[in-house]
Amino acid sequence: MKIDILKHELVPHHEILSEEEVEKLLKTYNIKKEQLPRIRIDDPVAKAINAKEGDVIKIIRKSPTAGISVAYRVVSKEII
Amino acid sequence: MSKTTANALIKRGLSKKLAEKVAEKYTLAALEKLSDAKIKKEFGKDAEKILKVLGRKVEEKKVKEKKATKKKKEKKPAKPAEKKVKEKKVSKVKEGTIRERIIKILENKKEYLPVAVIDEMAEKIEKNGLEEKLEKIVEKAIEEYNRHLMDPYEACGMVAAQSIGEPGTQMTMRTFHYAGVAEINVTLGLPRLIEIVDARKDPSTPMMTVYLEGAYKINRDKAKEVANKIEITRLINIAEVETDISNMKVVVKPNLKSMERKDIKMDDLMEALKKLSKVEIKKTEDGIEIHPQEGNENYRELRRISEEVKNIKIKGIEGIKRAIIRKEGDEYVIYTEGSNFEKVLELEGVDKTRTTTNDIHAIYEVLGIEAARNAIINEAYSTLQEQGLNVDIRHIMLVADLMTATGVIRPIGRQGVSGEKGSVIARAAFEITVDHLLGAARRGEVDELRGVAENVIVGQPIKLGTGSVELAIDVKKLSKIKKVKE
């Protein structure tokens, strides 16, 4: 039986950004994609939402201090 | 008298004299706890000023307080967070009006406040009927919020390290403790904190909290059923095993009572025994006889069979030594000694959304890096809380962010995050000096003197701080400047 990990309370909401959104994001912070934190391509959540290498994933976390906080991770293959 | 308290009060706008007077009696935290009336009694005509700096009037004191380290991270997600708020508020019609207005004001001012603050403001404004002063309140909140943001260049990692480290010195060295009435042994205190930060593969005392769903949650017998499926039962737990040397056989005498308690049938037992190799099994009236294969009937073989029989797994999940049921509120929860996150989640009756483990690597493997980040925060924070140490959660969030930034869990320390120094001098200053210097000389390494340690060694001012920038001159543009001057 396969379980739906996206429903687990430890897993925040993940969504793949479209290309325009990525561009806007990188422009806002004036950074390159490589400067974002990473998520492995074989990460269970990345697999579950069918992310491809180079995709930027927007993560909407529940934060005890801010209520909701948003973070981004870029899908990456290499291990550093 | 606490100098920090006095300074903090002065910073908030109290006169020096009054601040010192207040600080003589109370710390900032104690002051916050006092009721309005008590303050008025204590300080007479100065009370109003004190109340004002405490933020009592404006009803948003929560925004204040806390350390200056606050909200460094929350600043980033400005725009997207607001969007989320809009989506959310549609469902809450009545509250939405004030929230909407707050958000509108923020939009007009091009400012940002975290959702939690907006929520709290909306709630309190509504409760106290302060709607006419809305604009002023929001303005004040923005002002306070921005004042408490971390400055660029602030060494937030250093602050986090010290904020966790100092209370850490007061942690108990006694490591074992019984968690609640369940008598489950868990590592707590400093050893546990080190375990989390070092990202050890297996925690020294793995433990799971298994929540149940549906009927399993309220019915004790059903909960017991799940617990039996989780807890590992070996043959030795439900039967006696005797070795009969004179007749060259191993006799298994099942204990029917304990079999019934664990909900195991005779067939299950036989099924499990069939897995044994090189034996002949006979069922007799009062038990099961196991003979070695013909031609191989010696003492050593008998010993081997006896040991193997005792350890046969009949039921349960590998790795889980004990499962205990406890009633919490109106539901039954199973606590286990030992952990096997993946397998337990697959069981019927287990709540797949809440069940958790203290094995962070297991969470990473099953639920991914973001869940692991949450697990690190939860575990580290509860370890500190349990010891009665109040460390601001933002410091721990920073640590968890750093540990998970590359997509895998990296330990803090020499093998992980802080061990990746590029500088030869920094590495040499830390350990095995000669080897590092020799190796660097042979390879012809260059030290750019970017880090802290190497600059201290050569006697230069250090560079530190998050978001620090280096200035450089664009030579092409330089020529343009000249032209203007001419």
Image: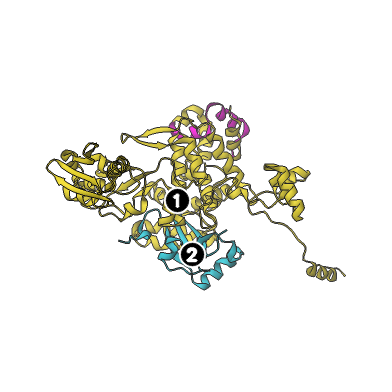
Give the vertical position of B445 relative to B324 (above or below). below
Q: Secondary structure at mark 1?
A: helix
Q: Residues within 10 Å of mark 1 (few under 14, many from 20)?
A: many
Residue B433 coordinates in the image, percent (x, y):
71, 43
Q: Secondary structure at mark 2?
A: loop
Q: Residue, x 57% and y 33% (percent of image)?
A: B5
User: What secondary structure predominates along the stretch shown in magenta?
Assistant: helix
**Between B276 and B165, which is closer to the camera in this rendering?**
B276
The subunit carrying tag 1 is: B
- For this orientation, the residue located farthest to the left is B285
Amino acid type shown at disc 2: Ile
Q: Residues within 10 Å of mark 2 (few under 14, many from 20)?
A: many
Amino acid type shown at disc 1: His
Residue B334 coordinates in the image, percent (x, y):
29, 44
- The residue under label 2 is A41
Specify the colour of chain A.
cyan
Stretch of the chain drawn in magenta: B13-37
The subunit carrying tag 2 is: A
Q: Is residue B22 magenta?
A: yes
